[in-house]
Image: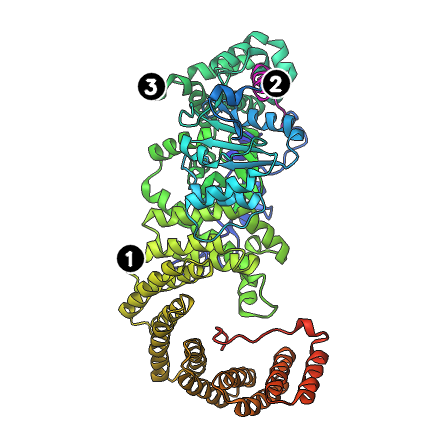
Amino acid sequence: MADQALDSIGPDRTEDPVRAGTGGTDPVRTGTGGTDPDRARTGGRDPDRARTGGTREAGDPAPPPRRPGAFLGRQRELKSLHADIERAGLDTLAGRAAGRARVLLIAGRPGSGRTSLAEELARGIADRYPDGVFRVRLTEPGGRPVPLEEAARGLLEELGTAPSPGAGDDELTEAVREALADRRALLLVDDALRAEDVDLLIPDAPGVLVLAVAQGPLTGVSGVRPCTLGGMDAKSAIELLTLHTGEVRVTVDPQAAEAVAEECGGQPAALALVGGWLAARPAASVADAVRHLRAVPEDGAQPPTTRPLARAFRLAYTSLPAPAARILRLLALAPAGRVDAHTASALAGCTVSAARTTLDDFVRLGLLHVAEGGHEVPGCLAGLLRAESEAVDRPAEVQLARARMLERTVRRLQACRAVTEPEGSPARRKLAALPRALRFASVPEAAAWLSAARPALLASARLAVDDGGLDTLARRLVSALVRALAAHRGTEAAAPDLYGLHHLVLDVAERRGLHRERAAALLNLGDLDARTGRTGQALARYRAALDAGRLAGDAYATGRAMESVGGAHQEREDWQRAADWYGRALAQRQARGEREDEARLYGRLGGVQTYAGRYGEALRSWRAAVAGYRRLGDVPGRARALSELARVQEYAGRPEESLRTCREAVEWARQAGDGRLQAALQLRLADTLDRLGDPSAAQLHRHAAERLLGEASSAYEIRGGSGED
């Protein structure tokens, strides 16, 4: 039945077509007069079911039940690993003082079950590590190394520590080690490529056990104790095969089952593929599997240790119908190896329901794994899929499939963000026009999808930028991802991800000579640097953004960059340079007639002049700010500017003027309905009256402030030179 379901998939339909040049019309449906041609051909039946065999007939045999998560064999290896954990002399044998985390290594080729063994060991000893089991993966299923920065950030989030946006590898790995230092925890480092990456994550904590999974020895890690995996023993291999085929076929021909185990080299991944091939053919015997497996020609380019897996894959792959084989090959393009029905649908150009049926069939055949939020391409098969695609698919077809996938991702992200907008907003109206399969029913549903898909989305953005031939789609994807993350997680929580995404925008802008986009990316990166205290780096980015804004002729970016340069100098307490740059930005805003920004910049200029002790200039700037807010009709802004003017007057030794200005500010704060500002101003009035020798009036203002705030301790001090002025 799996063959029947897969054989009927049509490759030419999609619920999310790339619509460029079609005027918004689905290009495959033009000329049908609005009638679904597939439904017409199937007599009104659901075309997805008609073409995919989505429902089985009553007489069709169902595949045998499988035990999810069943772990078989490897008892000798488990016993050896447990003994290594119990052994007291790990540090002594390594020739180092006790104090560093112990490291165990499970080494084996992809498909040998090395990660499953690590997970089984972790389950068995988890109760010894009360602070938890933490996992980090250093290689994507496709073989691409996960950037150490991204891996460390993910681990820090799992550890409950907020990573600093823009932090480098050294800073992040040090943060990981510090977060683990006082814990009794198990750290599982999966699919490590380089010993140095593992070594950077090992904390100086005797209570931590690091369990690393790699293909070969980690010679750069001191004191590591390796456990090398070969093939499974014959009994366990046959049990694994039985999970797929059922007991009857194995029982009636045990010699054939042993032959399958031998042909597969005892590799779990190869056995799963042969088992899936048999499960899809209830009438076939195990001997048939042996005969077909032996008939698969060996690939001389494959190392001897990987040939059993390659042959099992060829057996499963060549038995697929052409449309299903095409979908499987294109899954090599899936970012981070993560696949859901939408990704498969976009890659293949078929409907979402057809793609979902196909993915489920691939799982039964052992060609995909079930993962959070969808499916995952097994790492041991990713290279084989890529090789098949390179041999069969034309580059233009592959690029078109990648473009469809990115376009679908953009639209999903747009829908994810739009669902957070109010009802009746333009974004919600645009959301309602999308196909039902692309929409989200609620904000929690969209947030859950974004959280589960986040690693794949970030990987998709990196791959799109690295491609170089899809820069327009890459820019749209990054922009949509930035907006969705900010909408659901907030700018502060999403800052680490946003930092990397703005870097991607900068890469594309520099490659394409897009000065406006380059300026925007530099400004965003500078803001993130400034928030994390990297003022010098922020200043360099703001200056570069100023140059890019001038090249683009973008007045907004230029003015924003000048103001940001001034803010960076203010942060460094270089009042003269800060005032100079605020003055430049102010002159530009005045020339463009941007009155709101003009009033705000007068306030920023007055703030730095106050800090510099130039009270005369500060008074002129704050009076100009008050006048600007008055012309704008901005009552809260006028009240705040008056409050700062009163402060400067007091600093300048003009208490009577300060008292009058402060009373005026209280009245405007009352009209603005800003109780906290009004209370703070009442307290300032009280302090001024005390200095003028009127304690009774001062006490009245303090009581008024207490009534406004509810309690005197909740009053706050108004600070001059804030960005709100």
User: Would you place residue 666 above or below residue 166 in this image?
Assistant: below
Q: Position of residue 692 (x, y in %)?
A: 59, 89
Question: Which residue is depicted at the point 30% across and 65% down?
Answer: 548
Label drawn at residue 242: 2
Residue hosting label 1: 512
Instruction: Please rate how many residues cluster around mark 2, counting C-alpha atoms within 10 Å: few if below 14, some from 14 to 19, many from 20.
Output: many
User: Would you place residue 163 above or below residue 55 in this image?
Assistant: below
The answer to whether residue 62 is seen in the rendering is no
| Left-right relation of 86 to 93 | right
Q: How is the structure coloured here?
A: rainbow
What range is drawn magenta here?
Answer: 68-86
Q: Amino acid at mark 3?
A: Gly
Q: Position of residue 707 (x, y in %)?
A: 72, 80
Instruction: Please rate how many residues cluster around mark 1, counting C-alpha atoms within 10 Å: few if below 14, some from 14 to 19, many from 20.
Output: few
Q: Nearer the viewer, mark 1 or mark 2?
A: 1
Which element carries disc 2, helix, strand or loop?
A: helix
Do the residues under discs 1 and 2 have CB atoms within 8 angstroms? no
Q: Amino acid at mark 1?
A: Arg
Tell which circle, 3 or 1, labels the residue nearer the N-terminal end: 3
Residue hosting label 3: 300
Do the residues under discs 3 and 1 have CB atoms within 8 angstroms? no
Q: Position of residue 187 (x, y in %)?
A: 55, 33
The answer to whether residue 505 is seen in the rendering is yes
Look at the image and say whether residue 482 sits in the magenta stretch: no
| Left-right relation of 619 to 551 | right
Question: Which residue is depicted at the point 51% across and 83% down?
Answer: 641
